[in-house]
Amino acid sequence: MQPTRVLQGLRYRKLRLTTKDTNKGFYKGNRTGSMGTHTTYGTYKIDWAKVRTYVCPNLSGFKLTPFVSRQVNVVHDQFPGDKLGPRNPHTYLARWKSENGLD
Amino acid sequence: MASPAALRPSMGAIMQTCRSAVTAPKVAVAAVPVRALSTSAALLKRHKYPTARVTRDNSKKRGESAVHKSGTRWKLSVSDEPLPEPVPRDELPPIQVDEDHGLWDFFYDRETIAMEPTELAKHGRSWTVSELRKKSWDDLHKLWWVCVKERNRLATAEWERNKSKLGFGGAEASSRDRMVKITMRGIKHVLTERFYAWEDAVKLAEQDPEIDLSNPEKPYEPSTFLEEAEETAEASSSEAQPTTTEIDPTTIPSSKSQAEAPRL
């Protein structure tokens, strides 16, 4: 039996890599990173320096909400003649110069 | 050795077996009233010769049965002290709660469990990327956390709605959540965009003769004098305007201008 050309993934792989496709030692992970180390006794020691802490900024006096009133019309940015648009480094540098030129 | 083990079952079980044993021959009941109960006695009795191996019963709960109401094999300790009487809820001292605790942010309201669907549906649209481009890093950072807290509140209400089986409100909550998620996506978009622009701008600045990045005190030294700058500004005012409009989307007006805008 031969899978279809799509499933064969001839040009580039269209299916996710699983343990069936690789040799041993394959660890896909869940993109979270480790929080400690495994010990020789099979337990896990948490390294508190590795544990993520997220510090919320001081929100007192901050009036923005996740929502914008529906009375505000949606206006999209226009960058006529500028292919890079908001990613244009020239615009960035010009603004940096005009504002303070420091940081 | 057999008798203490045999006598262990509770009185209730003994009475029960005694009652059931009434139909059985009376001689057996009178002679060994509890032998029928004991399952370990026979085992312990079996080998009495000197070289017999020890067949200890390792099951400490043998014969105990919840179905047959045998009770425990050992007497449990009993104290003479009277049981404390439960205090009615009204007479209990009030629970001390920190009014400024951060976990209060997980609720919309301190009195109600979850918002009504009609209240939940009262929300605006999400932020567009164009609007977010005008915001500073600090504003975006704070707005991100406002979004996080809003999603926390929604998740808490959702959990409460499922637990208390309140019924409606899931659709409204999910549409609200979708709006928050779009805003958060926009924040990520803008910050990524800004970072890429900064990366390219640094490369550009290295080639710029006016900029000396090795000098942290004053990296930017304008080559043109003020008078010339004014002249050129006047001369190229028609040219300068489109450039300023190009800059405009990324300018950072403070959040004060947004303060008067209708919220929610």
Image (tube, grey):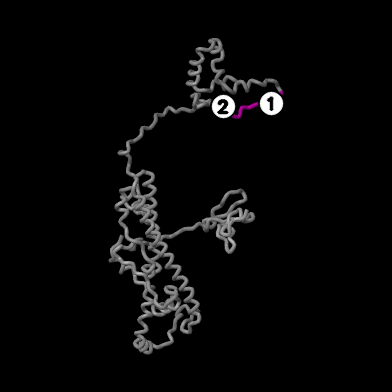
Query: In the image, what residue type sits under mark 1?
Result: Arg
User: Which percent across, then down, holds residue B152?
Assistant: 39, 54
Give the residue displayed 47% in from the left and 58% down from the top. A53
How many angstroms separate mark 2 from mark 1 (CA)?
Answer: 21 Å
Task: Judge whether A45 appears above or below B49 on screen.
Answer: below
Give the residue displayed 30% in from the left and 56% down from the top. B122
Query: In the image, what residue type sits under mark 2?
Result: Arg
The reply to whether residue B101 is in sight is no
Q: In this view, does A7 lie to the left or right of B126?
A: right
Q: Which chain carries label 1?
A: B
Task: Judge whether A58 appears above or below B90 on screen.
Answer: below
- The residue nearer to you, when weighing A88 against B219, is A88
- The residue nearer to you, when weighing B145 against B237, is B237
Give the residue displayed 30% in from the left and 69% down from the top. B257
User: Which percent across, then down, holds residue B3?
Assistant: 58, 19
Image quarter where the C terminus of chain A lies is: bottom left
Instruction: Examine the structure image and report whether residue B55 is included in the region drawn in magenta.
Output: yes
Q: Mark 2 lies on which chain?
A: B
Instruction: Examine the structure image and report whether residue A21 is included in the region drawn in magenta.
Output: no
User: Which percent across, then down, holds residue A14?
Assistant: 55, 60
Tell me the mark number nearer the camera, choosing from 2 and 1: 2
**What is the magenta range?**
B51-62
Q: Based on the displayed image, in which of its 4 quarters is residue A29 positioned?
A: bottom right
User: Which percent across, then down, holds residue B140?
Assistant: 39, 65
Disc sitting over residue B62 in the figure: 2
